[in-house]
Image (cartoon, rainbow, N blue to C red):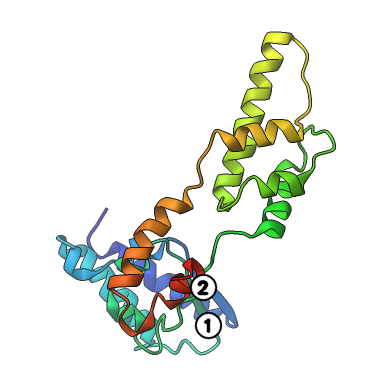
Amino acid sequence: MWLGNSERNLHEIFEQARYNQPCVLFFDEVDALAANRTDLRQSSSRMVINQFLSELDGVKSSNEGVLILAATNAPWHLDSAFRRPGRFDRILFVPPPDVAARVATLRLLCNGKPVEEIDYEHVSKKTDNFSGADLKAVVDVAVERKLQEAMKMGIPKPLSTKDLISAAASLKPSTKEWFATARNYALYANEGGLYDDILKYLKI
């Protein structure tokens, strides 16, 4: 809202982490704070990025004992300065969950809901390339359909394997669109092997 307020807030977060070391700082959707400065029109956004870089470097205060992690779905939008040594210099590719991970995720998402004996392994095999968010959508759609059915019939019934598979069939994995974009960057903008893990995963 006010110029300079974001920078102060960012500084306070780092100061709190330094005071409570050992500490882990995790920034989700970090591209919102660390976008490429050449893409930005507002100088205020650039000031936030400069403050972020200064905090990562520990210019005025040491970051000893503070582990700084971040996540993004668009690493190609990060300012290159954030990938220099001592900053976010290690980039790890996290692929979509495999069969076992999807089974565990589905079990967690269905926990506490009225369910029959569900064959999670079977449902998992029908949700190849589904992300965690996609799996949540599967369960949400199945629950919504079950509620609509209960309103018509007047009898609530528990979720079944068939319900989850039917819900999954009506949805498409969001990861496909992401990989289409990531593939282009991995093939044509892979300076320093930044996207080698993506190429390996895609078997290119």
Count of numbered tags: 2
Camera-side residue of 37 and 53: 37
Quadrant location of the C terminus in the rendered image: bottom left
Assign a secondary structure to mark 1.
strand
Q: Position of residue 175 (x, y in %)?
A: 47, 53
Identity, as a three-letter code, of the amino acid under mark 2: Leu
Left or right relative to 68: residue 39: left
Residue at the far right: name it.
117
- How far is mark 1 from mark 2, CA to CA? 7 Å
**Which residue carries the number 1 mark?**
66
- Tell me the crowding category of disc 2: few under 14, some 14 to 19, or many 20 or more residues within 10 angstroms, Cα based: some
Q: Quadrant of residue 151?
A: top right
Residue at x 56% of width, y 50% of height: 130
Q: Quadrant of residue 137?
A: top right
Is tag 1's residue or tag 2's residue first in the polypeptide sequence? 2
Q: Position of residue 148 (x, y in %)?
A: 64, 17
What numbered label is drawn on residue 106? none
Residue at x 41% of width, y 89% of height: 86
Contact, CB < 8 Å: mark 1 with mark 2?
Answer: yes
**Which residue carries the number 2 mark?**
25
Identity, as a three-letter code, of the amino acid under mark 1: Val
Q: Position of residue 140 (x, y in %)?
A: 61, 35
